[in-house]
Amino acid sequence: MALTNNRYVTDWVEEQIKLCRPDRVVWIDGSEEQLAGIRAEGFATGELIKLNEQLLPGCVYHRSALNDVARVEARTFICCEKQADAGPTNNWMDPNEMRALLRGIYDGCMRGRTMYVIPYSMGIVGSPFAKYGVELTDSIYVVVSMAIMTRVGTDVYDAIQGDDYIKGLHAKADLDAEKRYIVHFPQDNTIMSVNSGYGGNVLLGKKCFALRIASCLGRDEGWLAEHMLILGVENPQGEVRYVCGAFPSACGKTNLAMLIPPEVYREKGWKCWCVGDDIAWLRPGPDGRLWAVNPENGFFGVAPGTSEKTNPNALHSTMKNSIFTNVVLKPDGTVWWEGLDKNPPHGALNWKGEPWDPESGEPGAHPNSRFTAPAKNCPCISPEFDNPAGVPISAIVFGGRRAKTAPLVYQSRDWAHGVFVGSIMASEKTAAAEGKVGETRRDPMAMLPFCGYHMADYWQHWLDMEEKITHPPVICNVNWFRTDDEGRFIWPGFGDNLRVIEWVLKRAFGEADAVETPIGYVPKPEDINLEGSGVDEETLKGLISVDPELWKQEVAGIREFYAKFGDKLPRSLRDELDALEQRL
Ligand code: GTP
Ligand code: SPV
Ligand code: MN
């Protein structure tokens, strides 16, 4: 029985039923009773495995297909009307052609299966900034994941006005990688995903909606949908300042978002609060500041490397009502992954479901294995998490994995230069997407795989925002990943990153000095608090040093990258690049 009378919803669902032909349709109402029943069904089919009820209450385990463990950028499409509007960094196909192709793949693909109808909200239901979606899926894993990652419930139907919602159709089909498609139709507010059952390919509220589609909505409505964490930093005076951070996938957003201050900071009364770990919707407020909300309701975090030492808040978030995907399954019904501790389990199953010998040298968990945890489980979740107005942003940090070149931190000269700094971001590729790991690629604003329209228009949109924000945040670039000659990270990272964020926030309030370099402002070494960090001032000087020779090479790389955008490249970005070259 349909749970809404909205014909824009019911007619569309009917159409998809005719196309996919499921045996059964279940309308999700968001209640715990219904979800418990669906989990039980997942246990029966093997799609889910129940974990140890004493040690991990309400938690489940899931394994995705061996060929289906990360986002597939090569098979992700933006199908706007004109190819020119998708730009050189997106795959494009004519929307009608794509629809015809997809129809062939979806045709009858849910025979013998159940279709679930999930009403969900990105943001707080009924709040002025919330956006709504309905996802159809034949995956129990998707249903239980969406119930954590978004706000699911029938109240969403009451909030949807007419056809103002994002339509999402997901089918696992045969999990055939050759016929896997993740497709966005920004002009129809529609997302179609087929032949995958993994993460960002199928949890359509996340990258597909909250970034690719929402970036288009933001362009049209005057706001920004960004791949950013949101962190509140409370100083000893009790004042909380907020920073957003855009890092590419698996480059430290979740870790920074849940940061625990170093002991010397904690003793003085510093606290950190997590508002979001992956996505921020940023709008100019009536006060001329930029305000951020996290449209999600949970964390889909990288498991490997998450430990009591690196990120206890994330670990504690996963201790109940969470999902673990592609990690090691222990005989006692608990889980393990590389970096959790130094005791790899014996008698366990690896992410493929095979008996795993920790001495084999093969990792037990997939490098892109993940946990899915409710935000409210997080010990440091911000009291503002549910505030529909969001939080005012004082600083934006861009960053990536750079072994050399990028210093620990530098501040842009002004907004336009800050947009330039975001546009030239580069990072070594990680396991979060298919492809070669370690290769450096340009990933502007960490949005390369997530911008739903022409990247150059997106930069122009960023530039245009300056007019709407009379009190703009400072924009900095950070790099936790500089390495020494042996390839070891020089900066301790994790909690110690607060030392850098403190300087960034002081800059935002005019409380710290800086040194001008050709690329922007870097800290005076004495202005970074190194007490208890194990880093000496000489090392810090190295970390914030700017090598003009490396940067000249960088300029050449940027020129090559910018050339892709031809005439569309905003004038002021070209000017910024010329000015940088001059200064060097
Ligand atoms: P997505 O969820 O894919 O968007 O990734 P993310 O940006 O949230 O990255 P996450 O915080 O999960 O970190 C990814 C990996 O980087 C993990 O293995 C972390 O342990 C590691 N990492 C995070 N922060 C730091 C840091 O400050 N220094 C070092 N050396 N490693 C870090
Ligand atoms: C990312 O790759 O940036 C993720 C994981 O957060 S996924 O949801 O699969 O996109
Ligand atoms: Mn993350």
Image: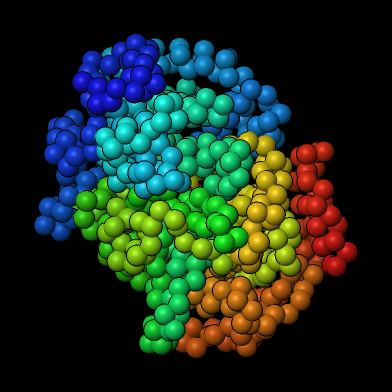
The coloring applied to the image is rainbow
Residue 259 coordinates in the image, percent (x, y): 42, 69
Residue 357 coordinates in the image, percent (x, y): 28, 52
For this orientation, the residue located farthest to the right is: 582
Q: Could you tell whether 279 is left or right of 363 in the image?
A: right
Residue beneath the point at 54% across and 63% down: 393
Residue 18 visible in image: yes
Residue 111 coordinates in the image, percent (x, y): 28, 14
In which quarter of the view is residue 418 placed? bottom right
Q: In this view, does 91 lie above or below 332?
A: above
Image quarter in which the N terminus is found: top left
Q: Nearer the viewer, residue 183 or 371?
A: 183
Residue beneath the point at 49% across and 52% down: 280
Q: Nearer the viewer, residue 568 or 161?
A: 161
Q: Which of 372 and 67 is in front in this view?
A: 372
Q: In this view, does 470 lie above or below 280?
A: below
Q: In this view, does 53 lie above or below 519?
A: above
In which quarter of the view is residue 399 placed? bottom right
Image quarter in which the C terminus is found: bottom right
Residue beneath the point at 74% across and 67% down: 413
Q: Could you tell whether 157 is left or right of 491 in the image?
A: left
- The number of discs equals 0
Residue 69 visible in image: no
Residue 65 coordinates in the image, percent (x, y): 35, 34
In which quarter of the view is residue 332 placed? bottom left
Residue beneath the point at 25% across and 22% down: 2
For this orientation, the residue located farthest to the left is: 54
